[in-house]
Image: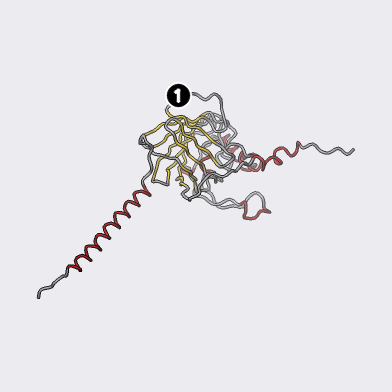
Amino acid sequence: MRIRIGVATLLAGASVLAAILVGAMISGAGQNQSTTAPRTSDGKPDFSGIWQAMNSANWDLLAHEARRGPVIALGAAFSVPAGPGVVEGNEIPYLPAAAARKKENAENWLTRDPEIKCFMPGIPRMIYMPYPFQIIQGKDTILMASEFASASRTIRMNTREKSPTDAWMGWSIGRWDGDTLVIDVTDQIDQTWFDRAGDFHSEALRVVERYTSIDRNTISYEATMEDPKVFTRPWKISMPLHRHVEKNAQLMEYKCVEFVEELMYGHLRKKPSNQ
C-alpha cells in the first residue's frame, strides 16, 4: 500500500516546523537578554541602575525572630520582622568590652541609633537599609546615592588619593578584580551603626566591599569588616541586591531632617514669657 502526501500537506508541515524553530530562537534570545548582565564600553560590568536589598538586616544583621517594637501603642506597625541573618557564621566577634557596649546600645536604641536622628548611615549600612539606592557608573568615578536622607558616596577608581578627613560616609577607593568591583572603605567616623540592634564600630573600621553580577537584575554583595578596636577578627556579610525594573523606577525624596527637628531641638525652643 502506497501512501501519498500532497504538496499542501508538506508545505503546512514545513510552516509549522519553521514557526517552532523561530519561536525557540526568539525565546532563547529573550532569555539571554534578561539574564546577561550589561557591560560598559570598556567591557566592565555595568552596575548602573536602582538597587535594593530585600531583607531585614537593617533591623539586625544576625538571625532573629520577629518581635514587638519599642512603642506598644503602635502595635504591629513598628514591630521587627524576622530574618535569617546575613553574617557569615551568624556571629559578630566583639571584644568583651565592646560586647557590653553593644548590649547597652540595643537597650537604648531609641535614643542612640543615628538612623533615628537622620544622620548619614555609613557603609555598609547604606546598602541594606529599607530604601533603594542608585548607582551611576563612570570609568574613573562611580556615584552611589541613597533615597535615605540623600546620602551619597563617591568611589574613586584606581587611585591612591588619601582622604582629607574622616566622614560619615567614609572614603571609598575602587578597583576591578576580574568582573568584581572591589571597594576599600576607610576614614568613617565612629558614630554610625551597622543596624538597629546596636552593632557598632570605631573610627578604625575598614570595610572591603565586593559587587559581582549574578544576572542582569541581581548583584551578589559582600562586605568584610575589620576593626581591631572593637572586633577580635574580621567578619563578613553577604546578600543579593535586586534591580528595580518597574517602568517609572526612580529615587524619591526622603529628606528626614525635618522629621527629627522636634526630637532633637524641641527642648531648645524659646518659651513665651509670662508678661
Q: Please state if 180 lies on the left or on the right of 50 as rendered.
A: left
Q: Please state if 147 lies on the left or on the right of 112 as rendered.
A: left
> In the image, is residue 211 above or below residue 83?
above
In the current view of this chain or complex, which residue is farthest to the bottom? 1
Give amino acid for label 1: Arg
Badge 1: few (under 14), some or many (20 or more) residues near its Cα, within 10 Å? few
In the current view of this chain or complex, which residue is farthest to the front? 8
Which residue is identified by label 1? 160
Residue 222 location, quadrant: top left
> In the image, is residue 157 above or below residue 252?
above
The percent coordinates of residue 93 (x first, y second) are 50, 37
How many numbered markers are drawn? 1
Residue 188 location, quadrant: top right
The percent coordinates of residue 275 (x first, y second) are 90, 38
Q: Please state if 98 lies on the left or on the right of 140 as rendered.
A: right
Quarter of the image where the N terminus is located: bottom left
Q: Please state if 39 lies on the left or on the right of 145 as rendered.
A: left
Of the pair 244 and 72, the residue shown nearer to us: 244
The percent coordinates of residue 260 (x first, y second) are 67, 41
Q: Secondary structure at mark 1?
A: loop
